[in-house]
């Protein structure tokens, strides 16, 4: 069995994976999901305030989610997420940028209404090759407990 609620330690920070963004994938993603000129057209991007092509923030989030699922959540007791509390796009992600994703555990608690699961509050950070944080995402994830308590009224 993969990670369960009990395995998450408040204060821990782990590297989850890395990804290098290419022109082709930036344009392809944006063409489908965020077709703003500075994501899909090199000339228009050059004339924009960004001075060149940049990845959509949603593309960056999607890449980070893929790393998290492949490298952490697969095989875990993850029950999904009730939502994202905050996304901050701090710096543009450009073609050739290599993003290192880190996941920190900010807090955790067993659910009061469903004691077979816990809520883990995490902070994802995407850091580029220059050591600059380009994105942060604060979210909650539900994880099943490895040894949940017996339901009330259950026979021992």
Image (cartoon, rainbow, N blue to C red):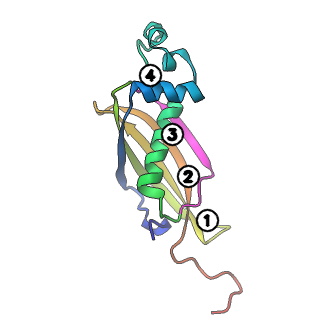
The label shown at residue 54 is 4
Residue 150 in which image quadrant = bottom right
Is residue 155 depicted above or below 115 in this figure? Answer: below
Disc number lying in front (3 or 1): 3
**How far from the left and from the top, in percent, is residue 106?**
46, 52
How far, Cα to Cα, is label 1 from label 2?
Answer: 12 Å
- Dot 1 corresponds to which residue? 111
The label shown at residue 62 is 3
Disc number lying in front (2 or 3): 3
- Dot 2 corresponds to which residue? 140
Is residue 83 depicted above or below 131 in this figure? Answer: below
**How far from the left and from the top, in percent, is residue 111?**
61, 65
Q: Pointers 4 and 1 in contact (CB under 8 A)?
A: no
Residue 42 in which image quadrant = top left
User: Upstream in the sequence, badge 4 or badge 1?
Assistant: 4
How far, Cα to Cα, is label 4 from label 3?
Answer: 15 Å
How far, Cα to Cα, is label 2 from label 4?
Answer: 28 Å
Is residue 147 depicted above or below 113 in this figure? Answer: below
């Amino acid at each position: 069995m993969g990670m369960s609620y009990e395995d998450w330690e408040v204060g821990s920070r782990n590297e989850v994976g890395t990804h290098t963004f290419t022109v082709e994938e930036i344009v392809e993603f944006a063409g489908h999901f965020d077709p703003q000129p500075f994501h899909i057209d090199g000339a228009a991007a050059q004339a924009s305030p960004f001075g060149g092509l940049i990845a959509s923030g949603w593309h960056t989030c999607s890449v980070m989610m893929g790393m998290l699922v492949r490298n952490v959540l697969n095989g875990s007791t993850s029950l999904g997420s009730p939502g994202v509390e905050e996304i901050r796009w701090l710096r543009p992600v450009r073609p050739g940028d290599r993003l290192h994703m880190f996941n920190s555990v900010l807090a955790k608690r067993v659910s009061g209404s469903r004691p077979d699961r816990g809520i883990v509050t995490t902070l994802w950070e995407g850091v580029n090759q220059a050591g600059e944080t380009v994105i942060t995402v604060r979210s909650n994830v539900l994880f099943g407990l490895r040894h949940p308590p017996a339901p009330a009224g259950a026979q021992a």
